[in-house]
Structure formats: structure tokens, C-alpha cells
Image: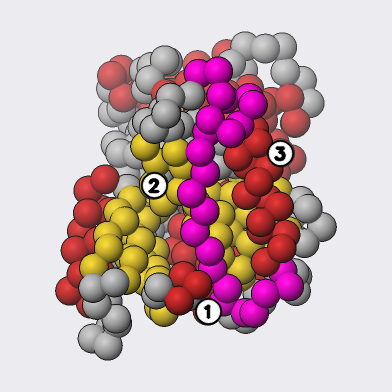
Amino acid sequence: MKNLIGDVRRTLDAGQAVVLATVVGSTGSTPRSAGARMAVCRDKTIIGSVGGGATEAEACCRALDMFAAQPEATALLDLDLKNDPAAAKDAGPGDRLSLLLELALPGSSAGRVVAELDDLLRQGLGAVLVLVLGNRDQEALARAVVKRAADLAPGFPLRAQAAEAVDQACDGGTALLRREGLTILAQAFAPPPTLFLFGAGHVARATAAVAGSVGFRVVVVDDRPEFATAERFPDADQILVLASFAEVLAKIEIGPQAFAAIMTRSHAHDKTVLGQVLATPARYVGMIGSGKKRRAIYNALRDQGLGEEALARCHCPIGLAIGARTPEEIAVSIVAEVLAVRAGVRA
């Protein structure tokens, strides 16, 4: 979801309008559940998916019609999967999908909400998107991005009911309530997992691109401001320039859901970073290098008092053994290993 929100924001920042499509309800067996999103651009480019097939095609057609509508236009579609040739064979009589379509223009309230949500996800923070719809052509009466129900502004329409929806979304991901003739949609966006890349060299650049494409929040860390730049790392969500690699723990919080890949420019810096990162509860720690380098660094850390249990947490050589040679190939092997650890199929 982080990638979709980021792509939509970049489209809006480029001055292009989009129509956002969100699954807000489903009955029976459907290809996507509530909360699934896609965006349709004026040039018919599609970002994301709400299930494919004829139902998604119909949603796209309706979305394209909305570009001629008034700003802030919204619509609710109730789609019967029995009318989708690709799904009709397996669809039951009650298999239906409800979609909310929203026209988002650059600078509109819908666009500002996307930007606010993107900023929070890039910071590694979760949020809830709240939308209140009226009955007249499903007019959007209010939108907000909040971290918790208490953050709703005092004048927010149906604030108590919206707070109820936010609480439900925090528990289950999405909530759709109908109160006093209005519809309230709340959707929770969980913060993406963070991958810290220690080092800003060629392999780090390639790894940032691959990791970003599969939904990781990428944080690049180096002590060289001329290397750790937004121009070199357009896929990074955050770039940190330290005065020294010795201050990793003083400057960075690495929690139990974080992933760390160490690939600095020298063995000495790798050792410095590894010793610190292994003192954190990071879910994954990997270090680039040969068996010879690993032995040298591990022995040095043993001399400093680091135990075998801590050293055993490090994946070195880093990445899956796929015969990678180029920075791009090595990046694929690293991210594949990180994904395997995240999925619980690799320790």
C-alpha cells in the first residue's frame, strides 16, 4: 500500500488528476477484501488492483468518466461478480463488491490527504484515513488522516461516530458505518517494515530500488554527505548522514520489526556497525562480504566480548546464494533473503 500511495502522490505532484478506487465492502467470495485500492489515471494507467476481471474493467470505465466531473466528485459502485465472465463460474448469488470512487485533483482535499498519508508512511508511522460521505451523489463531506480517534478535530462531521469507525479500523483494518443518513469509511494503514542500509555505495543504491519496489521503507545511513543524497537514492524514504558510524545506536532506533543490511565502504566500518546492530532486537541483520572477511570481523568482535549467540544472528555472506555478481543481482539476492525472513520461511 505504501507504494500505491507514493505513486499516487507523485502523479498528483506532477499536476495529473487520478481517480482512487477503494473496496469498501464485499459479500460472499470476492477477489479482494475491504481496503484494497487502485488508482486510475487520465491516460488509462492503472496503479494497484481491486481484483481484476470485468468488475475492475467496469470500475476503470466509470473512473475515466469521472475526469469530466466536478472537483471532489465521488461515487459508490455495487458490482455483482455474476456479471464478470472471468468469475461467474465460481461466483455465488451473493458475491458482490462495493467500490468507492474518488476524483483527486492536484491541490484538492483528496490530494492533500494522500500527501499527508504518504509523509506518515515514509516516516514509518501508521495512520487511519477517514472519509464521510453524504447522500447527494455520495458527496465527500469531510476527509482526515489521524493516528487515533482522539486526533479528529472537534468540528469533524459526526465526530463521535467517526471516532467509532477509527477505533474499528485500528482493530480490523477497515470500517464502514452508516449513521444518520451518512456513510463513514475508515481505513488503517500500517507502517511498512523498515530496511536500514548502512553504506551508500553501488550495492546500496540497487538494494534501495529493489526493496522500495516491494514495499519496504528504506533508510540509507552513511557518514559521507556527498554519497548519501536524494539524487543518488530516489527510492529511499529517509537518508541519514552520521558524523561517524560509531554513533549508530545514539542516533537510530532499531526495533524488533526492523531489517538491517550492512555494506559500508570498509571492513572497519562494517565491524563498527555490526557490533552495534547486534545489540538491537532487529529482526534481520545481514553483512556483505566473503568468508574471510566474516572470520576477521567475527574474531575482532569476539575479542570485544560479543558472544556466539549474537554473532549467529548475522547473515554473512548476505543474501540468497543465487550466483549474484553485479550490484543489481546482489540487491535481488539481499531483498529475497529479507523477504524470506519477513515471511518466516528463513531464520
- Residue 105 is one of the magenta-drawn residues: no
Question: Which residue is at 72% across, 18% downward?
Answer: 324
Residue 5 in view of the camera = no
Q: Quadrant of the C terminus?
A: top left
Query: Looking at the picture, does residue 82 appear above or below residue 14?
Result: above
Q: Nearer the viewer, mark 2 or mark 1?
A: 2
Residue 102 in view of the camera = yes
Name the N-terminal-most of marks 1 and 3.
1
Instruction: Tell me the distance, in whole angstroms, between the alpha carbons under discs 3 and 2.
Output: 39 Å
Contact check, label 1 and label 3, Cβ < 8 Å: no
Disc 3 residue type (three-letter): Ala
Q: Position of residue 323 (x, y in %)?
A: 72, 12
Name the N-terminal-most of marks 2 and 1.
2
Q: Which residues are magenta?
A: 67-90
> Mark on residue 109?
1
Contact check, label 2 and label 1, Cβ < 8 Å: no
Secondary structure under tag 3 reads helix
> Mark on residue 206?
3
Name the N-terminal-most of marks 3 and 2.
2
Q: Is residue 30 left or right of residue 265?
A: left
> Mark on residue 25?
2
Q: Residues within 10 Å of mark 1 (few under 14, many from 20)?
A: some
In front: 63, or 154?
63
Question: In this figure, which colouring scheme has been used for the structure?
Answer: secondary structure
Secondary structure under tag 2 reads strand
Disc 2 residue type (three-letter): Gly
Q: Residues within 10 Å of mark 3 (few under 14, many from 20)?
A: some
